[in-house]
Image (cartoon, helix red, strand yellow):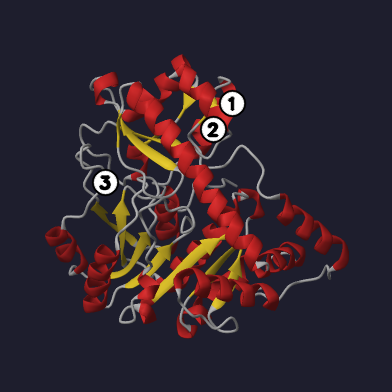
């Protein structure tokens, strides 16, 4: 009997993650990895101690599928203190296996075959994968690459209005934005909210970098806008908040009627998370003085790293866009690499200079023409950034 060995049709256009590929190449060539967005240093020890204590003393059976009650309560308080948005921990907060699973569960719960889903490109590759899995159709809207002297990525509002009027069911909106480092302003958010509300577009807001916004910029969420709030799904995570990507603990907050649907998918996939990580994080989130101090010092530390790498790149001949949030820098190499593609450029940089980066075209459904942008991650130890600076 012949067994057909082919992947499901909806996954055929989804290739291997560029992040996995570049990290593997970095390891193979003993290169410094400024590509994948994970810190090469430990997160706060207080979290490890709290989780370790719970591992020994808390229950070791299934948690409630929606998450441990103590953590849901603390997440709701955390968001209220941070953003001024109130969620009911019982009916509007769900603990997920990282922000990744929160996004997959949300898209799967809401998108039918052929539904149009708006993405702001460049967009994180996970978004395309989640939409493909649900059978949706990606409708890309490209942010305009910056005039370097002005510094930030922007929207063409007339084009945006037209795209939103084309029958979009759902949009995935990411601010602070990966990979560009853009933080959408309050004025931009209010304008987007009005357009989404006008067309009844549900918004999944990926806000995992909400605590990494650098002065004078401020994070403002679509969930803060009353007229769009019933259509907003807000996603964040402990991994990005604390620089502990291995925690794999996230949360999705949404109105109760939407949460009910997301929980059905969540329960059918991972069912629940382990109790000790959840209860350890609940304890940490309850320590408000420590939490405020940690998040403030974390922002200052990352801002110094951003400034150091920005200066290094500019001295090396790159044209660098302004990073307002996240731990990423987008840089244009047109003065260094001629007309070669960003994929070839990043691989040459890795082999010849031992620096791993990410080609920005991998964040698009269809690569733009004459595109000379790459992404650097600065969530690294000082000695890592200094070593990279010498190589560049």
Q: Cβ–Cβ below 8 Å for labels 1 and 2?
A: yes
Left or right: 281 as drawn, with respect to 354: right
* Cα–Cα span, label 1 and label 2: 6 Å
Label located before the other in sequence (2 or 3): 2
The single residue placed furthest to the top in the displayed view is 352
The single residue placed furthest to the right in the displayed view is 56
- Tell us which disc is closer to us: 2 or 3: 3
Q: Cβ–Cβ below 8 Å for labels 2 and 3?
A: no
- Between 317 and 350, the residue placed more toward the observer is 317
Q: Locate residue 102, reporting x and y percent.
A: 53, 64
- Between 185 and 346, the residue placed more toward the observer is 185
* Cα–Cα span, label 2 and label 3: 27 Å
Q: Cβ–Cβ below 8 Å for labels 3 and 1?
A: no
Q: Which residue is drawn at 25% across and 42% down?
A: 151
Residue 47 falls in image quadrant: bottom right
Q: What element carries label 2?
A: helix
Left or right: 265 as drawn, with respect to 287: left
Q: Mark 2 points at which residue?
A: 23
Look at the picture and state if 205 lies above or below 377: below
Q: Locate residue 210, reporting x and y percent.
A: 46, 59
Q: Name the residue under label 1.
A: 27
Residue 63 falls in image quadrant: bottom right
* Cα–Cα span, label 3 and label 1: 32 Å
Q: Locate residue 32, reporting x and y percent.
A: 54, 26
Left or right: 275 as drawn, with respect to 388: right
Look at the picture and state if 202 lies above or below 346: below
Q: Mark 3 points at which residue?
A: 152
């Amino acid at each position: 009997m012949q067994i057909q060995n082919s992947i499901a049709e909806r996954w055929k256009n989804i290739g291997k993650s560029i992040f996995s590929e570049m990290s593997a190449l970095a390891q193979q060539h003993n290169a410094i990895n400024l590509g994948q967005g994970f810190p090469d240093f430990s997160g706060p020890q207080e979290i490890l101690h709290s989780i370790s204590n719970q591992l020994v003393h808390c229950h070791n059976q299934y948690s409630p599928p929606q998450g441990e009650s103590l953590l849901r309560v603390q997440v709701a308080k955390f968001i209220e203190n941070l953003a001024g948005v109130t969620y009911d921990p019982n009916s509007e907060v769900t603990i997920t296996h990282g922000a990744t699973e929160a996004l997959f569960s949300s898209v799967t719960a809401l998108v039918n075959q052929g539904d149009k889903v708006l993405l702001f490109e460049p967009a994180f590759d996970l978004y395309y994968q989640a939409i493909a899995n649900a059978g949706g159709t990606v409708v890309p809207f490209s942010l305009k690459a910056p005039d370097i002297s002005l510094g930030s990525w922007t929207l063409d509002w007339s084009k945006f209005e037209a795209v939103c009027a084309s029958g979009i069911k759902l949009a995935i909106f990411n601010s602070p934005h990966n990979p560009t480092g853009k933080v959408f302003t309050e004025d931009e958010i209010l304008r987007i909210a009005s357009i989404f509300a006008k067309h009844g577009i549900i918004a999944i807001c990926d806000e995992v970098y909400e605590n990494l916004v650098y002065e004078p910029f401020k994070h403002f969420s679509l969930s803060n806008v009353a007229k769009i709030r019933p259509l907003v799904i807000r996603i964040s995570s402990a991994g990005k908040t604390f620089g502990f990507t291995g925690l794999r603990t996230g949360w999705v907050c949404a109105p109760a009627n939407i949460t009910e649907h997301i929980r059905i998918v969540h329960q059918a996939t991972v069912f629940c998370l382990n109790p000790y990580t959840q209860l350890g994080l609940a304890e940490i989130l309850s320590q408000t003085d420590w939490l405020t101090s940690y998040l403030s010092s974390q922002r200052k530390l990352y801002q110094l790293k951003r400034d150091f790498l920005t200066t290094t790149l500019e001295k090396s001949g790159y044209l660098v866009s302004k990073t307002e949030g996240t731990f990423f820098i987008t840089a244009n190499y047109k003065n260094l690499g001629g007309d070669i593609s960003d994929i070839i450029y990043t691989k040459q940089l890795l082999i010849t200079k031992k620096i791993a980066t990410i080609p920005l075209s991998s964040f698009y459904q269809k690569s733009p023409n004459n595109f000379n942008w790459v992404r650097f991650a600065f969530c690294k130890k000082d000695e890592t950034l200094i070593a990279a600076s010498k190589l560049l």
